[in-house]
Amino acid sequence: MTEMVKVESLKKAYDKNEVLTGIDGVVNSGQVIVVIGPSGGGKSTFLRCLNLLETPTSGKVFFEGTELTNLGEKQLDDIREKMGMVFQSFNLFSNMNVLDNLTLAPKRVKGQSEADAQKKALELLAQVGLADKKDAYPDSLSGGQQQRVAIARALAMDPDVMLFDEPTSALDPEMVGEVLKVMQDLAAGGMTMIVVTHEMGFAREVADEVWFMDGGNIAEKGTPEDIFDHPKNDRTKDFLSRVLAQ
Amino acid sequence: MKMNKKKANLVFAAIVMLLGMILSFTPQTVHAADDSLQRVKDKGTLVMGTSPDYPPYEFITKVDGKNKVVGMDVQVAQKIADDLGVKLKVKQMDFDSLLVALETHKVDMVLSAMTPTEERKQSVDFSEPYYNAGQAIIVRKQDKSLYKDKNSFVNKQVGVQTGSLQQDLAKKQMKKSNLKALTKVTDLILSLETNKIDGIVAEDAVARAYVSNDSRLAMIDAKFDLGGDETSTAIAFSKNSGTLVAAANKSIAQIKAKNLTKGYIDNAGQYMSENTQNTSMLHYWSYFAKGIGYTLLITLIAVFFGVLLGAIFALGRLSKKKIFHYPSVWYIEFVRGTPLMIQVMFVYFGIGLLWNNIPAFFAGVVAVALNSAAYVAEIIRGGIDSVPNGQIEAARSLGMSKTDAMRTIVLPQAVKIIWPSLGNEFISLIKESSIVSIIGVTDLIYQLRAVQAATYRGVAPIAVAMVIYFILTFTLSRILNRAERKMQHD
């Protein structure tokens, strides 16, 4: 197993407000890491620091052995190409139809031909069950459909790792399942994934490792069984008792 | 943040100081050695500044199908130019702008029925007077019996031309009258005919010209107490140009000796009667056509560069780099915080100090474009700001560069949002560009004045110009609406 992503004493502060207080962790190739924890615990910020959408205040982020925090913009663009990201609010390009959403970056960043990009895009749309929506504009799709397109868009770049930032939090309950299904299939296919989510069922079922984050650091790490059945940390216990009671 | 503000203030102070330096440049040019005559001879042209709305002194008429400034002053200037063996060039502008044009060397001399008052002598030199005129008051014909002289206008509204000798005289000697100063004699006549004022103080030659061409008007002798020079008309030169003044005085001495002015006035009278033979607006279509042409040209060029610069300033304002951010913010704030009229005058006269022969048209377009850029920048910034940040983040997470994301994702979305406001800006530019007429750019407003002066008709040219403006803006707004609808369907 090779190290895909590694962080060392990662810190992030906005002015004097410390959001991440020092995070260490390793994600190996093929692993699915699910990050859980209370809102405001720094989960999203942590994820966004991994592809430098947020610039860490201090600490190091390694991706496939390359340290990212002192790279230039151009080199960062090359790195981000390999780190797919899925957002809570989908962020599909609203001025383009579904197909163009998927082919834009492969064409402009990877220099793929229109034909190649389209072929790949159609395959991915079929994979997420939306082949018939290729000409639709984002605002005519449901939230679940938009999120599945967003996943396909990220996959179109052939990423080595996929970052999911609360991908189901903005969805109506009946649409959560279709998105989780796509993610589950991805995990089964061997994709390295880091998922921030509140879906405990998904965490228990799919995760190789669960990281519990609270107060800007990782309070506890372990297998789903460790975390959900035998939590050691008081904060983990407290959180789980509140979440699972619902 | 505090540091930034301090720095911002520093740079702002620097800009103000720079402005101050440009301003203090004026006296230096005044103290330069007197090579005025040599300069005119070297360039082979004598440039005369005038405000051609003052028949018979200067007004516009059609000669061989072309608009031309004619009148007694032009003939006096022509005589001087002939005596010097150089060509005469006539530059038109507002009366108020004439002395500034002289100070900034846009013109070599000013002949605009100007009286050499003490106040004016402070800032410019005058030749010997070339003409002596009495002062009259123009009134409505049916009211003529009510008035005897200047003292009959107690509590009445009396019109004068802004910055004129008549304004000074009326201020001092008609204290019980209410004065109303307007820039254009034609506007004064219009005010008189529509009962907004009861009389107009004017030189008798001017008064006679209007009265003989308009049956609704009459004139009376004003009977002012006049000092020596105060009734006379002379040529203004910039300070310290004694050699040029001396040359002009030689010509003026000949004009006086041979009594040439009488012939000049008769000549002007002929042009005037030609002008008034046909006062239908249709006859003057070429004036309006030229005006439309210039108005559209100014607007188009200003819109093009306004959008281009506006986009740059918008991106500058949005930039995280201070070196781009702050200059853009200051520029936008400064331009939006000062009137377009002052900006036009500043570009023409202020920048003109550094670049002597800046053409009025160029200066006008530059000023309007620079002004528009500030407003367009804010429109564009608003449009870009309204595109959700997530759109950029998504693009960047796919490995696209900031520039690429901006071009393919943000700007296309922003354009849709800003299109209607941008359209409004185009339309208001058609109207606002009219301000360039003050520096003599022959746009629609300027031509409207010219037609007023030529025909002695006040309202009709205004109505024509108004309709033309409306047709222009209405057509443009239709076109823009159509484009907007088309964009929504895409």
Image (cartoon, grey):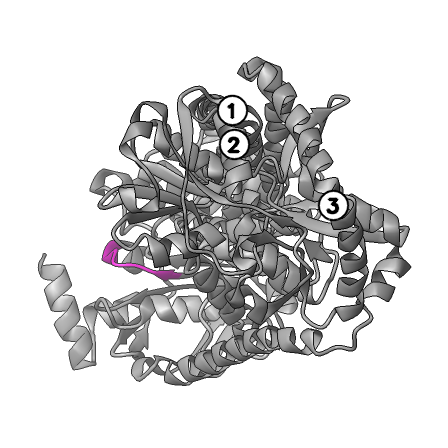
Q: Residues within 10 Å of mark 3 (few under 14, many from 20)?
A: many
Kind of element beneath mark 3 = helix
Q: Position of residue B445 (x, y in %)?
A: 53, 35
Q: Residue at x 60, y 30 (%)?
A: B291
Mark 2 near mark 1, Cβ–Cβ under 8 Å?
A: yes
**B472 up-or-down from B310: above or below:** above
Q: Residue at x 42, y 84 (%)?
A: B6
Mark number for residue B212? Answer: 1
Q: Residues within 10 Å of mark 1 (few under 14, many from 20)?
A: few
Disc number lying in front (2 or 3)? 2
Q: Residue furthest left?
A: A245
Which chain does the residue under circle 3 lie in? B
Place residue A34 in its image quadrant: bottom left
**A213 up-or-down from B282: above or below:** below
Q: Position of residue A111 (x, y in %)?
A: 71, 47
Which chain does the residue under circle 2 lie in? B
**Residue at the disc numbered 2:** B208
